[in-house]
Amino acid sequence: MTVIVSTFSNQQIEAFQSQFVTIYRDAFKAPPYCKGEEEAMDFAQSLPQHVEREGFRMVVAVEDGAGTLVGFSYGYQNIPGQLWHEEVARAVQPQIVAEWLMNTFRLVEMAVALRAQRQGIGGLLHDHLLSKLPYRKVVLSTMAAETNAYRMYQKRGWQVLVEEVIFPGVARPYRVMGLELGEEREDAV
């Protein structure tokens, strides 16, 4: 499958909201995720709020020729006061908070439709989302399991910052990971 990866504007995101929810539902329904309708609706409610966050950026993968949306990834600036930031800060050493949770970008979500998985689309989304960011470091949380996403992050140089964090209202533990984006980033904060 050939895809085109591009950045979406806030207006495009609003127009394609239902397709993002469909992809999310499809991407995470199978094991080991086993996310159901409640999680899909939580995602649907949180996306419009996330779009308003400082530094928000979303990239999408569209099947070339067909024009079908097959994946997306987004993130925003990770700052104190956000639920994720506060929960992770409680779970890690103060040194990790200072080094990894301040002035960083958080990769919040990445989803690829089930039929398009294992074709390198997640990697394309990852690389496009993180290209030319004005940050030195990126953080994320991913299920604490041997998933395809976890293996992709490892191959791209992500390091585990903490093996298990339990977020409020989430039964499964998550790993928190960090990635240094490189020294050539003169515009980084």
Image (cartoon, helix red, strand yellow):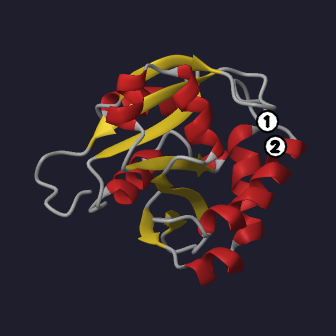
- Classify 10 Å Cα crowding around label 1: few (below 14), some (14-19), many (20 and above): some
Nearer to me, 166 or 80: 80
Could you tell me which residue is drawn at 72 percent across and 70 percent down? 17
Quadrant position of residue 36? top right
**Tag 1 secondary structure:** loop
Nearest the camera: 127 or 181? 181
Tag 2's secondary structure? helix
Residue 103 or residue 157, whichever sits in front: 103
Please tell me in which quadrant of the rendered image residue 70 appears: bottom right
Which disc, if any, is residue 35? 1
State how far apart marks 2 and 1 are (Cα): 6 Å
Q: Position of residue 117 (x, y in %)?
A: 56, 43
For residue 19, above or below residue 11: above
Percent position of residue 66, x then y? 58, 73
| Residue 15 position within the rendered picture, expressed as x and y whole percent measured from the top left | 70, 80
- Per the image, the residue denoted by label 2 is 39
Residue under the point 58% across and 17% down? 164
